[in-house]
Image: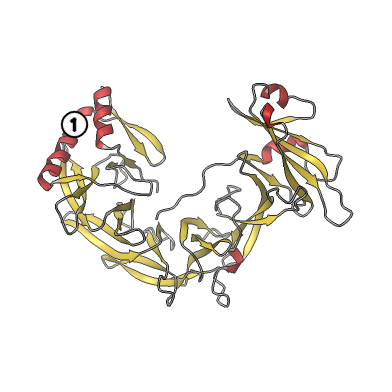
Amino acid sequence: MNRRIFRGVGLCALLLTLSLSLCGCMFEQSEGLYALPILPEEYSQLQSTIQDVMDKQGAEYATISSGSNTSTVQLLDLNDDGKQEMAAVFLRVTSAEEKPLRVCLFRKGGDNNYRLTYVVEGDGTSINSVSYEDVTGDGTLDLVISWQMSTKVHILSAYTLLDAGVSELMSTTYNESYLVSDLDKDGAKEIVVCHQDSTGEGANLAELYDYNGGVMTMASSTRLSNGIFGVYSVVEGKLSDGKPAVFASSLFSGGSLTDVLTIQNGKLHNITLNTESGYSQVTTRADAGVALSDINKDGVLEIPISMKLPNIQSEESAEESAVYWCQVNEDGSLAVSCVTYHCQTDGWYLVLPDNWPEQIAVARDDSLSHRGERSVVFYYYPGGEDAKPEPFLTIYRLTGSNRQARAMLPGRVTLYSDSTTIYAASLQEDVWDCQLEQKDLAARFFLITAAWDSES
C-alpha cells in the first residue's frame, strides 16, 4: 500500500514561504515536491503552537542526520485517508540532562487547529533517522526512530500511537544499519537490525524483530559475513522467485560483498553465507563503481559482479570491466540476468549481447576532447597470442557547440540527446558477427542514474 508521508520544510523556510504566497505552501514529499492545498493561516496556527511548546520546554530544533525524512517539521498521513492529520516536530531541550531529544506530534482537529497530542523522548546527541512504517499490521503507520548516541552507536526504537498515548514497541542498540520490510508477507513490516562485532571475539549478526502480543521482539537472528569492515548499504529486494529479501552490502578485503537475508521456515537466514569460509563468497566482488539495482526492470534486484576485460592500451591505462548482473536464487546461488559495460566517466551504460564479454576489449579515446568529443571504443578481441584487436563500435559523448553536426557525421546514429549533450554511436557490422545491428543500439543504451539508497 502506498502511503503518503509529507516532509515539511524547516520553520524558517516555512515562514518565508508563508510571506511570499497567498494560496498555499510548498512541502517536500519523499518522491519530490508537492504543493499542499492548505491555507496559510493553518500553518500560522501550527507555527504559533510549536513556538509555545518550544518556549515552555526551553527547546530548539533538532537535526535529523540521514534517511529520507530530515526536515524538522513533517506533515503526516498516518492512516492513508489522503489527509495530513498529524504534524511531527523534532526538538532538543537544551536544559535536559537525560532524554533531551523530543518528537512532538500535533494532531489537527475538526477546527483545523493543531494540538500537541504525543511526545516521544529520546537520548542521544541527535536523531539519526526517522521513518513511518506499519509494523503492527493495523493499517496505521508507526514511528521508527534511530537515536544517535555516538559516531557508531545508535538506539533503534519503534512506537505506536494509541488513544491512551505513545506505546514503545521495541528499543535496541546497534552499530551498523537497519531496514524495515515485510519479509514474511503478513501485512506487518519487520525490522532487520545489523550489528558488527567490535571485540573480535563474537560474530557479526542480523536480528529480525517482529510484532507479537503488543510488542516487537527479536524473533530470530543470523550471522553476517566474517571479515567485513562495515555495512554501507541495506536495501530490500526480491529473489529470482519473487520472494522478499534484505541485501546487506559491506566493505570486504579488496572490494565488497552482499549478505542476502530472507525468511525460511519462519526464521531469518543468510542464504549466501558459505559456512566453511565464513563469508558470502559468491557475492564477493571488486568495486565496479555501480550499486545493486533492478537493472532490467523485472522486479528482481541484481548484484553487480565485475569481470576485467583485456587491456589493449598502455599499462598506465585504467582497466575496463564488464558487469555481470546476478539475481539470487532461493538456495543462495547466482544467475546472470544480463551483462553491461558502464562508462562512469561519461555517464552511460550499454547492455551487451550474450556473446560479447569473452570476445571484446574496451578503451577510451579522448583525443578530440578539445572539440567537445569524447569516446569509448569497443574492439573485437577473442584473445590468443596472434589475436589483433579490431575496433567495431564507438560511442561518442558530444558537448561542443558543433555537437549536432558531429552527431550527423556519416556512419553515426544518435542514441540520446538533451539540451547540452548528444550521445552517438557508429557500428562496423562487418568486423565480426556481434549479433547486433546499429539500429538496435539505442534500445541497449542508458544513462547512469542515482544508486539505491538505504536507511542507516
* Res. 279 visible in picture: yes
In the picture of the structure, the residue carrying the numbered disc 1 is: 44
Report the label total.
1
The single residue placed furthest to the left in the displayed view is 56
Report helix, strand or loop for mark 1: helix
Decide which of 244, 231 is in the foreground and name it: 231
Say which of 206 and 39 sits in front: 206
Name the residue rendered at 15%, 56% in the picture: 164
Residue 80 sits in which quadrant?
Answer: top left
The image quadrant that residue 280 belongs to is bottom right
Q: Residue at x 44, y 61 (%)?
A: 183
248 shown above or below 69: below
- Indicate the amino acid at tag 1: Ser
Q: Name the side, left or right, on which 335 lies relative to 72.
A: right
- In the picture, the quarter occupied by the C terminus is bottom left
Taking the image as shown, residue 341 lies to the left or right of residue 434, namely left
The x, y position of residue 301, in whole percent, is: 55, 54
Q: How is the image coloured?
A: secondary structure
Residue that appears at 68% across and 52% down:
321
Give the image location of residue 265, x and y in percent.
Answer: 47, 72
Residue 177: image location, x then y, percent: 40, 60
Residue sitting farthest toward the right: 386
Viewer can see residue 112:
no
Q: Is residue 228 above or below residue 82?
A: below
Mark 1, other Cα within 10 Å: few <14 / some 14–19 / many ≥20: some
Q: Position of residue 43 (x, y in %)?
A: 21, 33
